[in-house]
Image: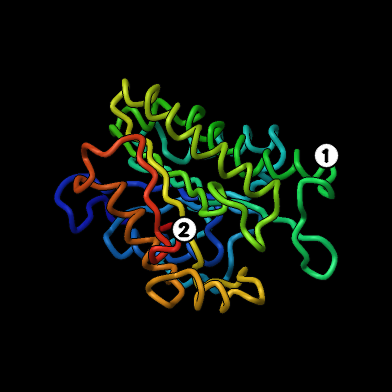
């Protein structure tokens, strides 16, 4: 593995959760293309047909819904960093359970186990990751990006209540972390994507595009990845505690 990137100086390292598809996948490609080492975490083992140059040694299989397994993974990641710095942590992994037939799970019909499962992955895992790797982030004066959602600030026709409230909580957590981690030189921001063209889009999304999005199109995963990249590099060196909306104007 090369020790330097196209940016002069030591090679920078990104840790990304939820890397296997969509926004996560595009983020890996964006950072890899810029010469970063990318460590990935997901529920799945390392894919043999991986499209970028990383190997299994840069992938950690973890169930983020399990606090003990998350702690194990954090220790494994620290070992792989070998005392080195972590320049960026992107908390992208999230789950959004549906009812039978793909129907939306509202606040009345979401059972408590589902609420708990969603919050463990979408809310608790990000703070566990950041706290567990705080020394490595501090060494790099690194950046944390939490991936929230347009559903965190308004009732969404497809995103369920547990998903939406977990993302609202993550947006609030981003502010708290920006205050606490900022004192250590670590910037913490979030991005709130709207309707992005990935495999998890629900039927009926085209109506949202027609009626609610001024740009009249879906966003692409790379359009999200580009903003994540900006938040992890010097371009955003004084941005801390922000939530960037990436939704084509859907929130206006």
Image side of residue 233 versus residue 165, left or right: left
Which element type, helix, strand or loop, lies under badge 2? strand
Q: Residue at x 65, y 43 (%)?
A: 121
Where's residue 38, x and y in %? 41, 53
As displayed, is residue 139 above or below residue 99?
above
Which residue corresponds to mark 2?
A: 193
- At x 62%, y 50%, the residue is 61
N-terminal label among 2 and 1: 1
155 or 45: which is nearer to us?
155
Q: Which one is nearer the viewer's eye here, 138 or 208?
A: 208
Q: Which residue is mark 1?
A: 112
* Nearest to the observer: residue 18 or residue 73: 18
The foreground one among 198 and 54 is 198
Q: What colour scheme governs how the chains and residues are painted in the rendered image of this protein?
A: rainbow
**Crowd tier of the residue under label 2, counting other residues whose Cα lies within 10 Å: few below 14, some 14–19, many 20 or above:** many
Hey, which quadrant is residue 143 in on the image? top left
Measuring from the top left, give residue 152's x and y in whole percent: 55, 47
The disc label shown at residue 223, or none: none
Q: Residue at x 20, y 45 (%)?
A: 234
Is 208 placed above or below 135 here? below
At numbered mark 1, what does the secondary structure look like: helix, strand or loop?
helix
Q: Which quarter of the figure is the C terminus placed in? A: bottom left
- Is 107 placed left or right of 22 in the picture? right
Q: Quadrant of residue 18?
A: bottom right
Q: Find the distance from the CA under tag 2 to the CA under tag 1.
A: 26 Å
Can residue 41 be spotted in the picture? no
**Position of residue 207 measured from the top left corner of the image (x, y, whole percent):** 57, 77
Answer above or below: position of 124 versus 26: above
């Amino acid at each position: 593995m090369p020790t330097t990137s196209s940016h002069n100086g030591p090679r920078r390292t990104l840790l990304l959760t939820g890397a296997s598809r969509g926004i996560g996948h595009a983020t890996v490609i964006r950072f890899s293309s810029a010469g970063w080492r990318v460590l990935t975490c997901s529920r799945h083992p390392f894919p043999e047909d991986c499209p970028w140059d990383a190997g299994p040694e840069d992938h950690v299989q973890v169930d983020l819904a399990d606090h003990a397994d998350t702690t194990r993974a954090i220790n494994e990641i620290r070992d792989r960093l070998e005392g080195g710095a972590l320049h960026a942590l992107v908390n992208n992994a999230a789950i959004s359970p549906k009812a039978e037939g793909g129907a939306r799970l509202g606040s009345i019909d979401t059972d408590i186990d589902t609420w708990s499962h969603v919050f463990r992955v979408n809310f608790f895992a990000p703070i566990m990751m950041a706290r567990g790797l705080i020394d490595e982030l501090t060494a790099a004066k690194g950046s944390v990006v939490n991936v929230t959602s347009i559903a965190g600030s308004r009732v969404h026709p497809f995103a369920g209540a547990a998903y939406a409230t977990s993302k609202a909580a993550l947006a609030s957590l981003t502010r708290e972390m920006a205050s606490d981690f900022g004192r250590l030189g670590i910037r913490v921001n979030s991005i709130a994507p709207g309707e992005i063209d990935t495999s998890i889009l629900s039927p009926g999304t085209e109506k949202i595009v027609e009626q609610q999005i001024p740009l009249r199109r879906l966003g692409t995963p790379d359009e999200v990845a580009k903003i994540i990249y900006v938040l992890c590099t010097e371009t955003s060196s004084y941005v801390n505690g922000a939530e960037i909306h990436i939704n084509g104007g859907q929130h206006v």
